[in-house]
Image (spheres, rainbow, N blue to C red):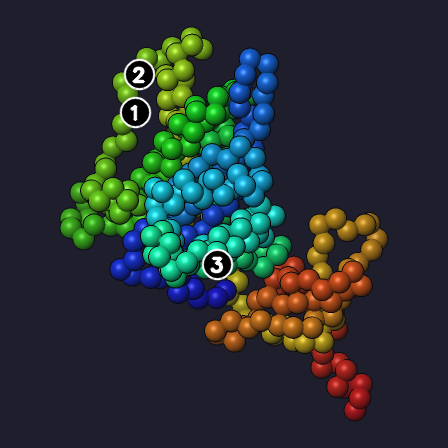
Amino acid sequence: MADLPQSRLAPFTPPFHHTSCDYFGPYRVRISRNKIVKHYAVIFTCLNTRAVHLELAADCTTMEFMQVLRRFYALRGVPALMISDNGSQLVGAERELRKMVEGLDTEKLQEFSAERGMKWQFTTPAAPHQNGCAEALVKSCKIGLKKAIGDHVLTPLELQTCLVEVANLVNQRPIGRIPSDPDDGSYLCPNDMLLGRASPTVPQGPFRHTKNPRHRLEFVQRIVDSFWTRWTRDVFPSLLPMKKWHAEKRNVRVDDVVIVQTSNAIRGTWNVGRVVSVYPGKDGRVRNMKVRTRNGEYERPISKIAVIYPAEGYKDQDK
């Protein structure tokens, strides 16, 4: 396992200065009496404070994601670095943003605080663990939120209310201890950095516990309460440290013959290829590479390939 990147350890930077984002969902919402559509949630997480910001997206198109980004920028500011996977809507948004920045003159760049631009970094295809900051929080939010909503169909504004309150609850989780009495129960949480003050309790009422479907405010509050119960039950075990990927192995090299894991492979067929390029990290370990198969060249992580014939074998044959 590699060391943490520098973007994860950037002291004296504001929240969301280095950010990771991802989509999750979908959730069914009612937009009229007889029409139900699917909406999605977009998660933004700060790579330093691990704070969470949730936004609602009507679909997975690039233009809709651009609107989500504009709302995020208006509330949290423009980050210096954005990390995401290779989703089509995310790649398209990066392309549109680059055109927008290139088309602005110096004065407009300064006006929008974009004179240095924003670096958008995509992870290697088929390597969701490289965007693990967002993936881990997606798992904790998505499972609890979906269980809390269940089969209920919300309106878009009600779903947006749930997302905002869920983000507040997730940002209340402990990430450190205040250096005072260790037995007083105090702790540091992302809300301390976002709000600039301690927020020991999350306002949740009092509300009436009614079964009347017209009392939508109480209904949404019960959903948030259910999420909080399930989040503390399901997420707490994941906060414990896990040891993995500590065994050292041989680096993958150019000309290694490998088997590439493919999700849609036909039964009885194997996707065999040859490594044509490797991308070692700062510690010299190769974790990403480019593989050439009969279908083309693809970038893949080390977890998706298996070496079946090392490059040294060719040298032994030549001798």
Residue 106, position as x, y percentages in the image: 38, 60
Q: How many marks?
A: 3
Quick one: SS at disc 2?
A: loop
Real-space Cα separation, disc 1 to disc 2, in angstroms = 8 Å
Mark 3 and mark 1 residues within 8 Å of each other at the beta carbon:
no
Q: What is the crowding at mark 1: few (fewer than 14 residues within 10 Å), some, or many (at least 20)?
A: few
Q: Where residue 35 sits: x, y (%)?
A: 59, 18
Q: What crowding class fits label 2: few (fewer than 14 Cα within 10 Å), some (14-19), or many (20 or more)?
A: few
Position of the C terminus, as image quadrant, is bottom right
In the picture, measured across the screen, residue 59 lies left or right of residue 203, that is: right
- Can you identify the residue that label 1 sits on? 204
Q: Residue shown at 42%/32% (left/top)?
A: 163
User: Along the polypeptide, which appears first: circle 2 or circle 3?
Assistant: 3
User: Badge 3, how many Cα within 10 Å: few under 14, some, many 20+?
Assistant: few
When the figure is inspected, residue 95 is found, relative to residue 245, above or below; the finding is above
Look at the image and tell me whether residue 133 can be seen: no
The amino acid pointed to by label 1 is: Gln
Q: Is residue 276 left or right of residue 147?
A: right
* Residue to which mark 3 is pinned: 102
Q: Are marks 1 and 2 in contact (CB under 8 Å)?
A: yes
> Image check: 11 left or right of 253?
left
The relative height of residue 151 versus residue 48 in the rendered view (above or below) is above
Secondary structure under tag 1 reads loop
Label 2 close to label 3 by CB (< 8 Å): no
What residue is disc 2 on?
A: 207
> In front: mark 2 or mark 3?
3
Q: Which mark is residue 254?
A: none
Expressed as whole percent of the image width and height from the top left, the position of residue 257 reads: 74, 71
Residue at point 55% right, 58% down?
123
Which residue appears farthest toward the left when viewing the image? 181
If you read the primary sequence from the N terminus, does the residue marked by circle 3 or circle 1 appear first? 3
